[in-house]
Image (cartoon, rainbow, N blue to C red):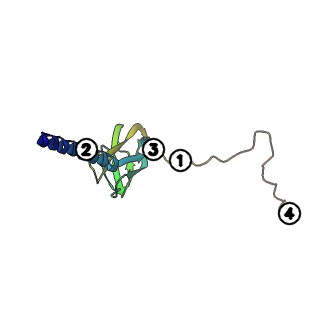
């Protein structure tokens, strides 16, 4: 009977230790976030994404992209939309725990990104002389 009690106590202790280890592992599991979480771009346009990892000492990520061109500097990725329209994904995966990741959705539209047009010169309303330059004095004056 004593042997059975000792065996049960050992099992309970093992189960408690395993439960404690699982709880601690969950508390230390990294949380990965990407900002912004979504973007809509014209072909050729760019957006910058930043990943943050909390809950672990190693806050670095490994990036992966499905389309476009990625320029990566640490936890920052600049996504340049390619010529193909459609939905794409940018994934930031924790280097500390590769099962933990975040995904940003990128939609590339069919239109082409164009530089901003220069501001139009303002002109006074028709029939108004307000804003008109002062008349130059005559040459013979």
Q: Camera-side residue: 121 or 62?
A: 62
Q: Residue at x 50, y 48 (%)?
A: 115
Location of the C terminus by quadrant is bottom right
Question: What mark, if any, has residue 140 been given in the picture?
Answer: 4
Q: Residue furthest front?
A: 1
Q: Quadrant of residue 12?
A: top left
Query: What residue would you read off at disc 1?
Result: 116
Mark 3: give few (<14), some (14-19) or many (20+) Cα within 10 Å. Answer: some
Q: Residue at x 81, y 54 (%)?
A: 134
Mark 1: give few (<14), some (14-19) or many (20+) Cα within 10 Å. Answer: few
Q: At which x and y percent is residue 32?
A: 36, 47
Query: What residue would you read off at disc 3?
Result: 113
Give the secondary structure at mark 1.
loop
Mark 2: give few (<14), some (14-19) or many (20+) Cα within 10 Å. Answer: few
Q: Camera-side residue: 21 or 110?
A: 21
Q: Camera-side residue: 85 or 20?
A: 20
Tell me the CA gap for discs 1 and 3.
Answer: 9 Å
Q: At which x and y percent is residue 124?
A: 75, 44
Front: mark 1 or 2: 2
Question: What mark, if any, has residue 16 been given in the picture?
Answer: 2
Tell me the CA gap for discs 4 and 2.
Answer: 106 Å
Tell me the CA gap for discs 4 and 1.
Answer: 46 Å
Front: mark 4 or 2: 2
Q: How many marks?
A: 4
Q: Is residue 116 left or right of residue 15?
A: right
Front: mark 4 or 1: 1
> Which of the marked residues, 4 or 2, is nearer the chain's N terminus?
2
């Amino acid at each position: 009977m004593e042997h059975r009690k000792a065996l049960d106590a050992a099992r309970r202790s093992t189960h408690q230790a395993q439960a404690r280890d699982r709880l601690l592992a969950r508390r230390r599991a990294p949380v990965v976030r990407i900002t912004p979480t979504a973007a809509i771009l014209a072909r050729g346009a760019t957006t910058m994404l930043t990943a943050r990892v909390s809950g672990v000492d190693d806050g670095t990520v490994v990036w992966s992209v499905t389309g476009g061109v990625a320029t990566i500097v640490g936890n920052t990725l600049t996504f340049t939309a390619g010529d193909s329209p459609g939905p794409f994904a940018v994934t930031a995966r924790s280097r500390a725990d590769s099962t933990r990741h975040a995904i940003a959705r990128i939609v590339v539209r069919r239109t082409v990104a164009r530089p901003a047009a220069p501001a139009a010169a303002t002109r006074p309303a028709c029939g108004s002389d307000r804003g008109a330059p002062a008349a130059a004095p005559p040459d013979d004056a």
